Amino acid sequence: SQTIHQWPATLVQPVGSPLSLECTVEGTSNPNLYWYRQAAGRGLQLLFYSVGIGQISSEVPQNLSASRPQDRQFILSSKKLLLSDSGFYLCAWSGYRVRNYEQYFGPGTRLTVT
Amino acid sequence: GNSVTQMEGPVTLSEEAFLTINCTYTATGYPSLFWYVQYPGEGLQLLLKATKADDKGSNKGFEATYRKETTSFHLEKGSVQVSDSAVYFCALPWDRYGGSQGNLIFGKGTKLSVKP
């Protein structure tokens, strides 16, 4: 069966510090991968998605970036965090070119920028 | 492109009450429709889905029927429990590029609180 992992689970970082969040998927190949952010009490905001290694699409201009160095690894980064980067970050995957669009989410990372 | 509108919460119910959370959509064709649930502090879980018109998705006592006439996919449960307290999201494919990326668009979420 497929599983998706995210780490760390929680993170407290000062403004201006760098960020690296990692997401890995097991039990599937060639997944589509997604990064979402959920601000407190708000809905989901799609940040990045990837259909393959090295292929990243950005949905929202910001100081975050994403990379996909391996088929089942997706990394969210920042060189300098802003207060507004605080939130709950969710990684998700879906099957390669599946037609039903089901997405499966990881447990999330709670980021607090102080 | 496709869009989804979900009733805003919060919704507070007593245990064993009937639940309805409204979801309407606009879409090209007849895309699959989804309900996701997010328990406090966790990621989203797929609750149920319907892949074609008139389909009924069901899981854990929840149901939703794909109504193409009213472009709706309302979530219902006959008797809610305290453990159903969560945020519920309606979703459908994001048809921006013909759908090949597998992206979904989500409603804003409805927070449900069930009191004993």
Image: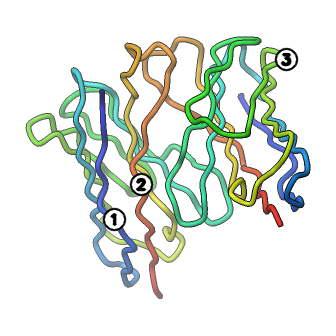
- Residue indicated by mark 3: A69
* Callouts 2 and 1 close, C-beta under 8 Å: yes
When asked about the image quadrant of residue A49, the answer is top right
- Residue indicated by mark 1: B8
Residue type, numbered disc 1:
Glu
> As rendered, which of A89 and A64 lies closer to the eye?
A64
Residue type, numbered disc 3:
Pro
> As rendered, which of B55 and A41 lies closer to the eye?
A41
* Residue drawn at x 32%, y 62% as measured from the top left: B77
* Callouts 2 and 3 close, C-beta under 8 Å: no
* Residue B99 position within the rendered picture, expressed as x and y whole percent measured from the top left: 41, 17
Crowd tier of the residue under label 3, counting other residues whose Cα lies within 10 Å: few below 14, some 14–19, many 20 or above? few
- Residue indicated by mark 2: B108
Residue B14 higher or lower than A13, as above or below: below
* Residue A46 position within the rendered picture, expressed as x and y whole percent measured from the top left: 56, 38
* Residue B108 position within the rendered picture, expressed as x and y whole percent measured from the top left: 42, 54
When asked about the image quadrant of residue A75, the answer is top right
Residue B80 higher or lower than A19, as above or below: below
